[in-house]
Amino acid sequence: MSAALDYGVQSFCFRHFKDNAEVAQKVKDIGLDKIEVCQVHADFKDPDSWKDTVKTYQDAGVSVISIGVQTFSGDPSEKSFFECAAIAGAKHISCHFQLDSYPKAITQVRTWCQEYDMRVGIHCHGGYHFGGQPSVLKHLIGLGGPEVGLCIDTAWAMQIGPRQGNPVKWVQDFAGQVYSVHYKDFVFDKTGQWEDVVVGEGNLDLKAFVDALEADGFDGMAVIEYEADVENPVPALKSCVETMRKLAG
């Protein structure tokens, strides 16, 4: 199976549920066994408590393949995020940088990546967020590569508009620099407001996107992320998994 189709789920999908054992069971319920854990479900500044969290997932047969999305400012205390990822056996962290601190932060993150044998993917988060559009991302990755690459959130990429925000074109434009993927899908109304839908049922050309990843030799981390139906996300996430599996043949 290609890395593009060997995916898990983002724990933010289950943000209504705070017990990690319950979250782990829901991961299994949707038919997956991998997770990217966000701060809703962990304190990454407390590696000792994180060890217990990792064990909870491992005992349930769920692998922690990434943590994030973390915002890095370059503060020395942020090294704990890398320690926590390493404790889980993960090789990836999804992240944001900030306008007022990114030069310092990227330099520090590169050092930690080298120390922990880790890759970091900058998560694009739409037009309202620093690092949400291609020219900024190219600049940041130019400063941070090869340790720092791109995490394409497919829905947020589309949110900036079809001319700049085509996820398929992003894979081509960032060839060899796509380190992770958040499979997410939006539909938009006439005001530009977005709505989460099952992956592959909205504006995302899912097959073309996966084909582009495979053509680029993608070897990174991938998760599904569906942010609606907060109190009952399992049915829609099952549909996301089913849609993805159709692509696997």
Image (spheres, helix red, strand yellow):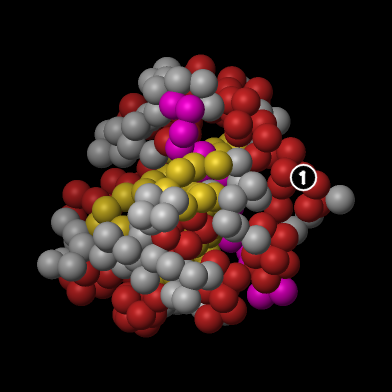
Q: Is residue 195 above or below residue 165?
A: above
Q: Give the residue type at disc 1.
A: Arg
Look at the image and tell me whether residue 40 can be seen: yes
Q: Is residue 138 above or below residue 248?
A: below
Q: Residues within 10 Å of mark 1 (few under 14, many from 20)?
A: few
Residue with the most extreme left position: 100
Instruction: Locate residue 63, reporting x and y percent.
Output: 58, 37
Look at the image and tell me whether residue 120 can be seen: no
- Helix, strand or loop at mark 1: helix
Q: Which residues are magenta?
A: 215-230
- Give left or right: position of 243 versus 81: right
Which picture quadrant has residue 176? bottom right
Residue sitting at x 54%, y 67%: 167
Instruction: Locate residue 62, reporting x and y percent.
Output: 60, 31
Query: Along the line of sight, which residue is nearer the eye, 217 or 110?
Result: 217
Query: Along the line of sight, which residue is nearer the eye, 26 or 197?
Result: 197
Query: Along the line of sight, which residue is nearer the eye, 38 or 194?
Result: 194
Membership of 176 in magenta stretch: no
Residue with the most extreme front position: 190
Membership of 224 in magenta stretch: yes
Residue sitting at x 46%, y 34%: 228
Instruction: Locate residue 134, reporting x and y percent.
Output: 40, 75
- Give left or right: position of 202 versus 113: right
- Give left or right: position of 219 versus 164: right
Which picture quadrant has residue 220? bottom right
Image quadrant holding the N terminus, namely bottom right
- Give left or right: position of 49 versus 179: left
Identify the residue under disc 1.
245
Residue sitting at x 81%, y 51%: 248
Residue sitting at x 38%, y 50%: 193
How many numbered dots are placed on residues in this image? 1
Instruction: Locate residue 81, reporting x and y percent.
Output: 33, 47
